Image (cartoon, grey):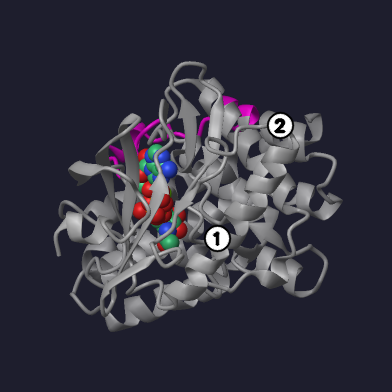
């Protein structure tokens, strides 16, 4: 189907000029659509939703609608700019949050947030600090949102125990005959078994609170103002679900404290950056510090280790299954991603005491 035929279903006044692939997400297909309107050129984000993964698009889009409308009202109350500080869905002519083009072919449109970018690697430490403030504020904002309203889009998304079981099954099945070339990675992955239940057990025993969490808190899921270097908006709300704050903290650390790209083939250049970790802790706790419980605070460093490890074993599982989940553009990309994560996990174990001391400092 042509972009024009898809976009004409959304409430946009104007003529479509172009529509090109945009951004670097691994899951959905994102495009930037430019329209000529009475007010001049206007850009929109068009996304083809990965409906193989998100099998209940109605439930997914209802979550995003609820959360963005809630945030919009809160931002307005606080005198902020609701067109920039939250995602804004563009609805279809019949008032829906998505358009179904064909069976398994779903699209959504967001207002494009101008003069802001998502970064794949920390270019300036203040960007990372700013992302921490943004995710902290986001968590704080949603602390008042009733999480029973959210449909659980991907159950067990950060259940590290289940991810570990998936890995073991993939090793056993060895579908595409790759296990022999990743022996060292498999050995490392299995050596971490004693940690995998830490957060899951705390949540399930009621010792750690379930909160509304974002669950995909990579730096490139916060848009940073290109002029002021301040965080503008948290995006990519597909994985909003009940979870632990240690997941959100940990996933940010996993991605941002690596000076290299997530899929760098030069694993030897990957080092866990303690100064960047400190930037993030400072920013996050400056806004969320009061709401956080002792057990959450104490487990933030373990959250970082586990989210990095979990992402590593997800990449490894996907490599063993023939690259069917994460989008790849070259061979062994998922293996490089795995190695990056595992190197970070090793560094974090070594720096664990220091990571805890930094939490105590703030
Ligand atoms: P994925 O789930 O595939 O990661 P995202 O929702 O994160 O998809 O979008 C991919 C990229 O598109 C983002 O990293 C960001 O650069 C850009 N993007 C997404 N939404 C907007 C928006 N409303 N305004 C500007 N850029 C956006
Ligand atoms: C995926 O969609 P994107 O690129 O923001 C993945 C995350 C991983 C991340 C690794 C729904 O995020 O869980 O941490 O890749 N999202 C989903 O970069 O699986
Ligand atoms: Mg994204």
- Kindly identify which residue carries mark 1: 65
Span of residues in magenta: 259-279
Locate the C terminus and report the quarter of the image it occupies.
top right
Image point (40%, 64%), residue name: 314
Q: Which of 94 and 273 lies nearest the eye of the viewer?
A: 94
Of mark 2 and mark 1, the one earlier in the sequence is 1
- Tell me if 245 is positioned left or right of 187 in this view: right
Ligand 1 - quadrant of the structure image: top left
The x, y position of residue 330, in whole percent, is 15, 51
Image point (61%, 51%), residue name: 248
Outermost residue on the top side: it is 227
* 269 magenta-colored: yes
The x, y position of residue 275, in whole percent, is 58, 25
The x, y position of residue 51, in whole percent, is 34, 72
- Tell me if 230 is positioned left or right of 301 in this view: left
Q: Is residue 111 above or below residue 272?
A: below
- Report if the CB atoms under discs 2 and 1 are less than 8 Å apart: no
The Cα atoms of the two marked residues, 2 and 1, are separated by 21 Å
- Kindly identify which residue carries mark 2: 79
- Displayed quadrant of residue 277: top right
Labelled disc at residue 199: none
Q: Is residue 139 above or below residue 75?
A: below
Image point (62%, 27%), residue name: 279
Q: Which of 271 and 201 lies nearest the eye of the viewer?
A: 201
């Amino acid at each position: 189907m042509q972009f024009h035929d898809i976009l004409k279903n959304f409430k946009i006044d104007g003529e479509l000029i172009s529509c090109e692939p945009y951004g670097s997400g691994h899951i959905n297909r994102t495009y930037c659509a430019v329209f000529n309107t009475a007010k001049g050129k206007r850009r929109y984000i068009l996304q083809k939703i990965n409906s193989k993964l998100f099998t209940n698009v109605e439930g997914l889009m209802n979550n995003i609608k609820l959360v963005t409308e809630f945030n919009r009202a809160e931002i307005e109350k606080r005198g902020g700019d609701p067109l920039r500080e939250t995602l804004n869905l563009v609805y279809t002519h019949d008032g829906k949050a998505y358009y179904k083009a064909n069976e398994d072919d779903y699209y959504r449109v967001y207002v494009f947030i101008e003069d802001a970018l998502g970064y794949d690697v920390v270019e300036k430490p203040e960007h990372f600090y700013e992302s921490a403030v943004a995710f902290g504020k986001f968590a704080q904002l949603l602390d008042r949102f009733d999480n029973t309203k959210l449909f659980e889009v991907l159950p067990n998304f950060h259940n590290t125990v289940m991810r570990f079981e998936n890995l073991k099954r993939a090793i056993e099945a060895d579908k595409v005959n790759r296990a022999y070339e990743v022996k060292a990675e498999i050995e490392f992955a299995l050596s971490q078994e004693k940690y995998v239940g830490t957060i899951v057990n705390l949540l399930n025993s009621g010792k750690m609170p379930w909160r509304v969490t974002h669950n995909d808190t990579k730096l490139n899921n916060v848009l940073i103002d290109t002029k002021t270097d301040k965080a503008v908006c948290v995006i990519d709300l597909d994985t909003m679900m009940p979870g632990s704050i240690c997941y959100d903290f940990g996933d940010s650390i996993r991605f941002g404290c690596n000076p290299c790209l997530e899929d760098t083939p030069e694993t030897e250049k990957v080092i866990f950056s303690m100064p960047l970790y400190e930037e993030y802790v400072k920013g996050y706790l400056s806004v969320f510090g009061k709401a956080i419980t002792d057990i959450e605070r104490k487990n933030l460093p373990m959250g970082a280790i586990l989210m990095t490890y979990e992402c590593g074993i997800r990449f490894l599982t996907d490599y063993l299954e023939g690259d069917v989940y994460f989008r790849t553009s070259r061979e062994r990309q998922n293996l490089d991603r795995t190695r990056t994560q595992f190197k970070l996990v090793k560094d974090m174990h070594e720096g664990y005491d220091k990571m805890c001391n930094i939490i105590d400092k703030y």
